[in-house]
Amino acid sequence: MKRPSGIPRPTAATRPPVRDEPEDARGTSDSDERHGARRLLGRFRSGGGDAEETFTAPIPLQQGGNSATDTRDGESGDDTARTTGATSSPWKAARARRRREREEVRRFTATTRRRRIIWASAIGGVLLLAATCVGLAYTPLMAVRDIQVEGARLVSSDLIVRDLDSQRGTPLPLVDQSAIKAALVKYPLVQSYSVESRPPDTLVIRIVERRPVGVIASGDAFDLVDVAGVVLSTTPERPTGYPLMVFEGDSASSGFTAAASVLRSLPDDLLSTVDEVSATTVDDVTLTLAGNGAVVTWGSGEDSARKAVVLEGLMANYPPDSVQRYDVSSPESAVIDPR
């Protein structure tokens, strides 16, 4: 519904005629633009003209360039900026999120990483130390220059050192054990041995000599033997300080085994006083003391250590010069036969 207006509307008779001018003749001054705007406003207010007519107001031109082109360029720049921002913003957010996740992971795994670093450093140090030791061990710095023999009393240590002279200049880990064995096996008195490497350049040979326990008559010679019957030396004359062993059979017989076990249990000072030991069976071992010829009935080789202690006590209280026989076959009830 149209509201009545108090202003009289101009009629067609009073309306000024509109001249149709060519488009090229129209000016583009500010006054023409204002007149054109007034005319358009008047037509709309009067309700005249075609309602479906479309009017496009002239766009003023700015000095120094085309305004339409500038406007389009600005819009294109804004669209590009918006597109770039819309494109780069998700990437920035994703990078920031990944960075925060990495920071959280590093924060929660700090103790584990520290423990791994400590273990890796320790293992690396041990491996480096081992590699250094191995490298030094196989260099000329660890070569054999000095050979020492320990435990030799009956065997000449100088001879052993001379036989092992081929090992000089060899790194300690590469010492030829078979060559050492071949050099020591030539000495019957050597029962066992051990090899020790003493850095930086010393090779130590510890030997355990066989202990001679008695002499066995072998034709016109005498063999010095140990408890196993190994002949340690052979001499034409009887060695002093060792008893003569009398038994039936050879060194593998039971008589020799019983006599050797008894002599082995005697202390050195008591063994030196024994002139002869005889054994027909394992339960019939008899000792003959040197000098006065006193006889000791020993019995079997069992409990020989205690029998030796009892005999030493009897000899201290009853000297062999005053006793004909000591009977320690039963050490709990020892018996003496005075002269």
Image: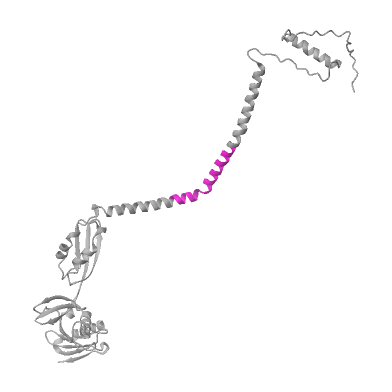
Q: Tell which of 275 and 168 is nearer to you.
A: 168
Q: Quadrant of residue 62?
A: top right
Residue found 56% across the figure and 41% down from its top: 98
- Is residue 274 visible to the viewer in this orientation of the structure? no
Nearest to the observer: residue 226 or residue 241:
226
Q: x, y percentage for residue 199?
A: 25, 57
Rendered location of residue 125, percent (x, y) = 37, 51
Q: Which quarter of the rendering shows the N terminus?
A: top right
Report the span colored magenta: 93-117
Looking at the image, residue 136 sits to the left or right of residue 33; the answer is left
Q: Is residue 75 something that shows in the picture?
A: yes
Q: Quadrant of the C terminus?
A: bottom left
Q: Is residue 133 above or below residue 214?
A: above
Q: Is residue 102 magenta?
A: yes
Compared to residue 229, the image places residue 336 above or below, namely below
Residue 224 left/right relative to 328: left
Q: Is residue 105 above or below residue 329?
A: above
Q: Position of residue 294 (x, y in %)?
A: 15, 88
Q: Quadrant of residue 254?
A: bottom left
Query: Residue drawn at (40%, 53%), measured in percent from left and top?
Result: 123
Image height of 30 relative to 330, above or below: above
Which corner quadrant of the image does residue 222 belong to?
bottom left
- Magenta stretch holds residue 72: no
Q: How is the image coloured?
A: one colour
Measuring from the top left, give residue 160's x and y in whole percent. Answer: 16, 65
Taken as a whole, is the magenta stretch helix, strand or loop?
helix
Q: Is residue 255 left or right of residue 97?
A: left
